Image (cartoon, grey):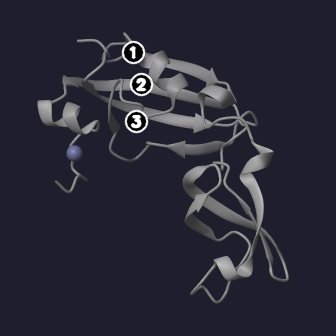
Amino acid sequence: MQVADNRAVSIHYTLTDDDGEVLDSSEGREALEYLHGSGNIISGLEKALEGKAVGDKFNIRIAAQDAYGEFADEMIQVISRSMFEGIDNIEVGMQFQADVNYGTGVVTVVEIDGDNITIDGNHPLAGQALTFDVEIVAIRPATKEEVAHGHIHGAGCHH
Ligand code: ZN
């Protein structure tokens, strides 16, 4: 069986940046299982996995636009402290789920100047090329329910 749409694919991976620093790895953990063709993983990696078989190993460097996107200056905004209702101690590095001008996502507080809070809605890995070392460890057809939901129902699933 090969990696194709609507198949549940399990991979072991190590993610490094251009300095060779390991950012994430499945080493010592369960393999990552995802539903292929549903955008569950970054597009560049999903494309590279297409057609691969169990036991295949490969290494790929994915440009920022096919990973977590280019860094966008417009994702950085200065907002008033009063927007953080109910949060007393705002600190640099805090992350919030937020409704920002450019979509909903996680924003990080990057600067505090009195009542002016600068937030950055870029993904922490935006603007970076990412290199993946990947091994495919299992492939199975996804269930009808998984395909309908657009994700797999693995061990950590609540329904
Ligand atoms: Zn589901």
Q: Where is residue 78 in the image (x, y as percent from the top left)?
A: 79, 65
Task: Give the left or right position of residue 75, taking residue 103 as reference.
Answer: right
Q: Residue 40 carries which label?
A: 3
Task: Give the left or right position of residue 107, taking residue 73 as reference.
Answer: left
Whether residues under marks 3 and 2 lie with C-beta atoms below 8 angstroms apart, the answer is no
Tag 1 residue: 56
Split into quadrants, the picture shows ligand 1 in the one at: top left
Q: 67 above or below 99?
A: above
Local SS, label 3: loop
Report how far apart the C-alphas of labels 2 and 1 lie in the structure.
6 Å
Q: Quadrant of residue 87?
A: bottom right
* Quadrant where the N terminus is found in the figure: top left
Task: Give the left or right position of residue 108, taking residue 57 as reference.
Answer: right
Q: Where is residue 138 in the image (x, y as percent from the top left)?
A: 26, 26
Local SS, label 2: strand
Q: Residue 46 carries which label?
A: none
Disc 1 beta carbon < 8 A from ligand 1? no
- Specify the farthest residue to the front: 101
Q: Quadrant of residue 68?
A: top right
Query: Which of 80 and 23 lies nearest the eye of the viewer?
Result: 80
Tag 2 residue: 135
Which residue shows up at 32% across the image and 44% down it? 30
